[in-house]
Image: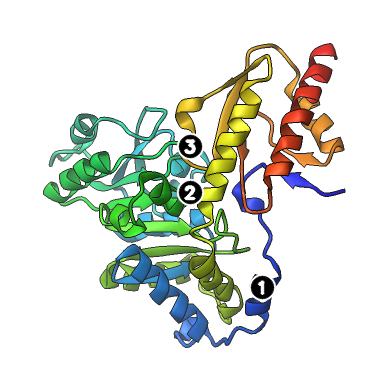
Amino acid sequence: MKWIDIRSDTVTVPGKEMRRVMADAEVGDDVYGDDPTVNRLEEIASGILGKEAALFVPSGTFGNQLSILTHTLRGDEVIIPASNHIIVHEAGASAVIAGVQMRTLDCDDGMPSVERIRKAIRSEDLHYPRTGLICLENAHSSGRLIPMEYLKEVYELSRKRSIPLHLDGARIFNAAIAAEVSPAEIAAQSDSVMFCLSKGLGAPIGSMLVGTKEFVKKARKGRKIMGGAMRQAGIIAAAGIFALERMIDRLSVDHRNARFLAEGLSTIPGIEVFSERLDINMVFFKLTNKARSRLIVETLLEKGIKINPPEGGEWRFVTNLNVSRDDLERVIIEFERALKVALAG
């Protein structure tokens, strides 16, 4: 049975060519800075994002939390939309690792008004924490693209108030394709950016943290403190190089497939697709009936289709390089059948 996995784009597996370059990678001890493949990956990543330097880290969560640790002082406050990945899906790590307080601004799309952000910045007062950082996310976990105009306004505010801005750019290349701009144009509206190699780009492991040389030098020490300094990491860095050189342009295929999937699901009675959130490779929808979600998941699993149960009443399907158009046609057919089974049960 061929498995179809649309739980996330993190489930992708490296193909034969990527595995070959991993096997053939020249390696050294990255803690000493002499792994040539890691060094090349960091040079490529910083160049693509238009930043001075880059650091290879184990995961996206690691990169985000390392950035917070690097930018802030213990006891600082971080301004962040409440719907961002750092808040929702990173296990409260900022309190544990950086010892900071999160000033969350409620909004579903990751774009609180610039005025709300301005009002959230603390003034100098004995009773207040220092506002140490502003965090945004693009593309946002809701499936939305954050417009360039908004990013520019928030970054202009952060610079006026001398507060660094970190961008969770886990899917920054998806965002760049959707916005029809270069990744560097998005990255220019922040002081640091984390992006993932292990999502749509298809590498098995790793993320990148980019910023100024001074920032990355400090982050390198923080990476060591957090246990993320690796030795012969060139084996996995080689996959990252392959991903950056060969896999960025194909992300548009995932976007088109997501729209195809959304159109197919929207024809099924009882499904409401959130069509306003189709900017990248994610499809969000809800059921308008009371079908048992667990039964739907289990029924599809028996058919060789892996999906996640709904979160907060919303279902999310994610297209990726291991899922074809034919696979998605099968998903649409089998989901409709599973929905009928769940309603009957």
Image: 146 above or below 313: below
Q: Tag 3, which secondary structure?
A: loop
Q: Is residue 195 left or right of residue 300?
A: left
State the residue in front, 90 or 290. Answer: 290
Instruction: Give the amino acid type for the residue marked by disc 2 in the picture.
Output: Ala
Q: Tag 2, which secondary structure?
A: helix
At 47% from the left and 31% from the top, the residue drawn is 277
Q: Which disc is residue 17 wearing?
A: 1
Q: Is residue 34 visible?
A: yes
Q: According to the image, label 3 marks what residue?
A: 143
Placement of the C terminus among the 4 image quadrants: top right
Image: 299 above or below 57: above
Instruction: Give the amino acid type for the residue marked by disc 3 in the picture.
Output: Gly
Q: Which disc is residue 36 wearing?
A: none
Q: According to the image, label 2 marks what residue?
A: 93
Sequence order check, earlier mark of 2 and 3:
2
Q: Is residue 311 visible?
A: no
Image: 148 above or below 13: above
Alpha carbon separation for disc pair 2 and 3: 23 Å
- Horizontal and vertical percent for residue 159? 16, 51
Query: Which numbered mark, 2 or 3, is in the foreground of this view?
Result: 3
State the residue in front, 292 or 139. Answer: 139
State the residue in front, 312 or 96. Answer: 312
Sequence order check, earlier mark of 2 and 1:
1
Q: Is residue 327 left or right of residue 82?
A: right
Label 2: how many Cα within 10 Å (few below 14, some 14–19, many 20+): some
- Horizontal and vertical percent for residue 323? 68, 48
